[in-house]
Amino acid sequence: MLSLSCTDPWPEGSLGLEEELVTAAAQTEQRDRVVSNNNDNICCSVVNLDDSLTSLQWLQEFSIACPDMPQHAHQQPHLFGRQLDSDTAASPLSGDPTSISVARGKPTATPYSRMQSLPSIVAHGHCLDEVDYKTNVHIKPPYSYATLICMAMQASKKTKITLSWIYKWITDNFCYYRHANLTWQNSIRHSLSLNKCFIKVPRQKNEPGKGGFWKIDPKYAERLLSGAYKKKQVPAVQINPALQNRLHIQPQPRGPCSHRRKMGINPKSQRLFREFKEATGADQNWDTHLGEGTMLGSWPEVRGRGGYKREQTALQRCSSPLFPLDEQKEIGPLKGDFDWDSLLDSVLSGELNLEGGKPLRPITKEEDLTVRGTYITPGDAPAGTADIHELVETQRSNDVSDYDEEAFLTRAFLESPWPEDEEKGRSDFLSNSTVNLDQLFEVGEALGGNPSLWIDTLL
DNA sequence: TTATGTTTATATTACG
DNA sequence: CGTAATATAAACATAA
């Protein structure tokens, strides 16, 4: 059966910054723009906290992006603002165990710590967690720019890095940004300047190179200790505009009505989920890792500013986690024999192993759930399957038929890894298929939100 | 000229 | 509705 590990090291092996930069410069036009600076000195200083103006939510979110980091920074305060003695900038590519969490070698949101505290719904959500942001060109990583900067800094193993290094790290680790237009770099610069978490360290007069260095204000880590910060919000699904034409996807306008068409969670589902959480006491054991990696995979979190971001993250977990990379290549997107229901069943039944060989635990009798008055009886074979089905039925019985299966489908379509050497083939397939998301939605709505019917109809 | 950095403006989304 | 956080765009300045 399928088995996915979230702890695999980066397969590319370790690359020094210089090597990385040379390689990167040869790979993409955008990387050609990256200016290397291999002589960045290391320094570390502590600055006073100023909590005005700018957000620090990314700090807490960073713990999501980097599950290896502690939930409570006070337990390992060195993780922020620590003095690092490595002269070799480390990215996740270098397999640094303290850097970004990886799944099959890519940065993903892979928190699993509390999975067992929640039943099959958790498993369902969890399995959808791992979007291969390293190779997926289409889906914008669910990390704020500040988070990305922070990740780059963390990965660099230095206390100060250059802007170009940040560019480099992001493009190396998030394929989306290799293909996106360069406005994101403007946003990065904007974030660095505006966000008080980032401190500019001027270059020494005798130091060659352009621009200064940037470091994290360690004082903001202290804010993290207090748990004062919530998660950020990002748009639900952001498809790489540079590739939308190839996908025959209408760009999502950033206008007053753009939110209406997003593949997010509709208010009904949000309300249902809120009630579900209340019914199950899911909040009692809540933490950011759980929220990112498990329950929210299929059930939208709606509390806090993180809700929106979590929606996106959740919805980015649809297809790629379900198959090893090689299988994904074989299967390809939306092949005719793709069986969504069986796939879902596999996940729900615990056959799909997602946690380093640790199979998903089926629901036990002791974990019966009552949701909106519907008693869910777990434990029947196939374990867990009936539970989620019943819950879904419960939803539908409560007029939530527009549950976010549409997002499930659409994202599954979009999220399969898209290595650059495969782009042509996939692009051709997509061009021939001419799958229009709006059309998909229309069909899906007409079919009452049943993904199997959607697929059957489309194929 | 280009990369870098600052600032302003606007839009979106969610929370209280 | 006000506020906060974030994203995006753009104008502008500065340094290499």
Image (cartoon, coloured by chain):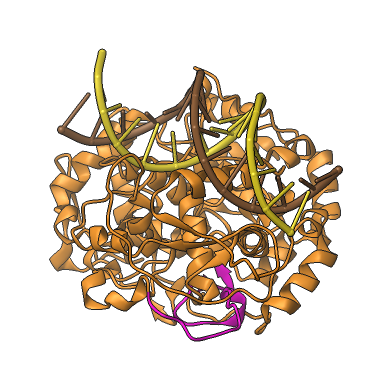
Chain colours: A orange, B brown, C yellow
- Residue A62 highlighted magenta (yes or no): no
Q: Is residue A352 visible?
A: yes
| Left-right relation of A147 to A394 | right
The location of residue A23, given as percent across then percent down, is 79, 72
Residue positioned 42% across, 62% down in the render: A216
The location of residue B10, given as percent across then percent down, is 51, 18
Residue positioned 62% across, 27% down in the render: A438
| Left-right relation of A311 to A291 | right
- The stretch in magenta equals A82-108
Q: What is the quadrant of the C terminus of chain A in the image?
A: top right
Q: Pick out the residue farthest to the front.
A: A205
**Res. A220 image quadrant:** bottom left
- Residue A103 highlighted magenta (yes or no): yes
- What is the count of numbered marks? 0
The location of residue A233, given as percent across then percent down, is 40, 41
The location of residue A16, given as percent across then percent down, is 67, 81
Between residue A144 and residue A203, name the one nearer to us.
A203
Between residue A189 and residue A150, name the one nearer to us.
A189
Residue positioned 86% across, 53% down in the render: A424
